Each structure stands twice: as C-alpha cells, then as structure tokens.
Amino acid sequence: MNITLRQLQAFKTVAEFGSFTRAADRLKVAQPALSLSIRELERELNLRLFDRTTRRVELTGAGREFLQSADKLLADLDQAVRNAQDLSERKRGRIVIAAPPLLAAMIAPGAIAEFNAAFPGIDVGLVDARNDQILEKLRSGEADCAIGTFDDREDGIRREVLAQDVLTLFCPPSHPLAKLKRVRWRDLRDHRLIMLTRDSNIRALVDRALRDIGENGGKPLYEVSQMTTAIMLVEAGLGAAVLPSYIWSFARDRQIVSRPLIEPQVNRPIALIHAESRSLSPAAEAFAKVLRAQARAAIARVVK
C-alpha cells in the first residue's frame, strides 16, 4: 500500500469543505491535481470515499469511517512533529549527566541551576558514581554525557579535555611539609602518607611518581576509598595526603594547607565524555556547553 500524507490531507480537506473547489483553494493546489489525489487514494483503499453531486461532495459510509482513522493519524503526526520541534528548540526533554561524587558536587549543581533557568522544560538527572559505573551507563545509554578523569584508551568514548588538574599535597598546618612553599616528590620519602586504595587511579599515579624517585611509598598510614575521608584524616592531624587539587573546594574551610607537588608535576586531564556511537541530543549539547563553562571556572578557582 502506498498512501501518502498529501493524499490524506487532500481527503480531509475535501471532507471538511464538501467541495473540491474550496478544498483546492485552501490547499493552494489546482483542482485537477486534488481530484487526482483523491482518485489515487480511493484506488489504494479499493473504496469509494465520496459521493459527488452537482452541488456538493459528500462522504460515503466508508468515507466517514476512514475519516476517523485519518483524523487520528494526522493528529498523531502533527503531535510528533511538534514534539520533535520542541526537542530541537530545547523546549522539552530529559538528559542525564554522570560524574564522580566530588566532581558532581563541585560542578553539577551550578551547571544544572544555570541550565534550568535557560531551559525550564528540560529535566536534568544526575548520577554520582565510580568511573567504571559511569562508563557502563554511557555505553548503555543510561547517561548522555559525563565529566571526570578517564583513561584515554577507553574504547567507544569520545572525550574533550576541559582542564588539567594537578596532584597536590594536603597536610595539617603543623606538619613538617607545611613549612615548604613547594614540595618535591623526594621530600615525601621520610613521611608515611594517607593514601587511597589501590583500585584508585589517583593511587596508581602516586605510586608511579614515588617509584620514579626510587621510593616505593612504604606502608601507608591509612588506606581509604574516598577522598573526603582522606581529607578528614588530614584535618584531624593524622598525616598528609596526595590528592587532586580540585578537592581544595572541599578542604579550603578546614584546618588544612595545600602545597604544590613538583619534580615532577603530575597532571590529570578532566574531560567531558560521551559514547562515540551516539550523537548528543540538542538538549544534551546545550547542557554540555553550560557544563564546560562551569567545570573550567570551578577548576580554575582551585587549581594553582
């Protein structure tokens, strides 16, 4: 069956006006072309849709029944077009952003508030999770985009570096290393550290930097899985920790000092990522633009 939208619109308009002449005027087509559309539709349906008299065109019984279905079909199509236009114009929709907990707390609230003010019809969902969970949600389509530090060797992921974070030393004001303006990695040799667990990417970077200076790091004072826990241990005066500089947004109001770590300086790219196999929706593109600006501004405030 080969029924076209033009034929359905022609049928509905003729039924509405009861006249081929007036229907042709409304549709701005020649009357012969309109008559041809109706004949083609009747041929496809194998039904007579109109009884034609010298004064008026009237629907047959089959025509009245078909009009109900055609009306619904055209109304559904019109609604689908309006929905698509709303999505294109960012008037409605839903997007989901994912980030590790600390970055989510640091960047996402401001980005969501700014986006909601500009696009109140779009719902924004937030997932704060581990990196492996974030990647799984991106690949499955549960999340549209994510922000964080991810291995650039991950398959099927498109990434855009937003800023460079730097590994930094955090310690109590009374700690011997707090007396230094800058701390070299070799200065850590005589100090046991509060460290993240070995499944952490940050721990891997710290261990690598210590090995590069001929130090295996020894036994940590404490091993914890959350950076916020490490910071609270530092504040309690229990030791020093090497963490991303952006955690200063959490630590700045505590009895803690931060010192740049040099020789070498260890950078970590913070990236906006999404699944390579899926293009971002117009709403997600708009949110990504806001997220970029918020991330760069937030990281710039704490990365020295």
Image: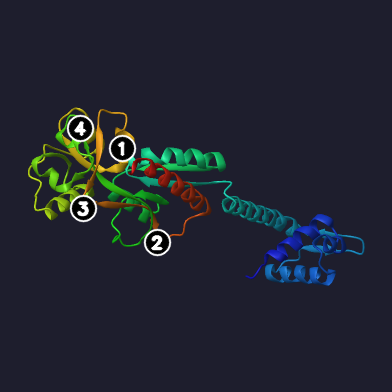
Which image quadrant for residue 221?
top left
Tell me, yes or no, if residue 120 can be seen here: no
Are there few (<14), some (14-19), or many (20+) residues within 10 Å of tag 3?
few
Q: Earlier in the sequence, mark 3 or mark 4?
A: 4
The amino acid pointed to by label 3 is Pro
- Left or right of 166? Residue 24 is right
The residue carrying mark 3 is: 264
CA–CA distance in space, label 3 to label 1: 20 Å
In percent of width and height, residue 12 lies at 75, 58
- Left or right of 165? Residue 200 is left
Disc 1, disc 2: CB below 8 Å? no
Front in this rendered view, residue 292 or 199: 292
Residue under the point 35% across and 45% down: 99
The residue carrying mark 1 is: 248
Front in this rendered view, residue 19 or 235: 235
In percent of width and height, residue 156 lies at 35, 62
Query: Which disc is residue 234 wearing?
Result: 4
The residue carrying mark 2 is: 276
The amino acid pointed to by label 1 is Trp
Name the secondary structure under disc 3. loop
- Left or right of 177? Residue 18 is right
Q: Earlier in the sequence, mark 2 or mark 3?
A: 3
Foreground mark, 3 or 4?
Answer: 3
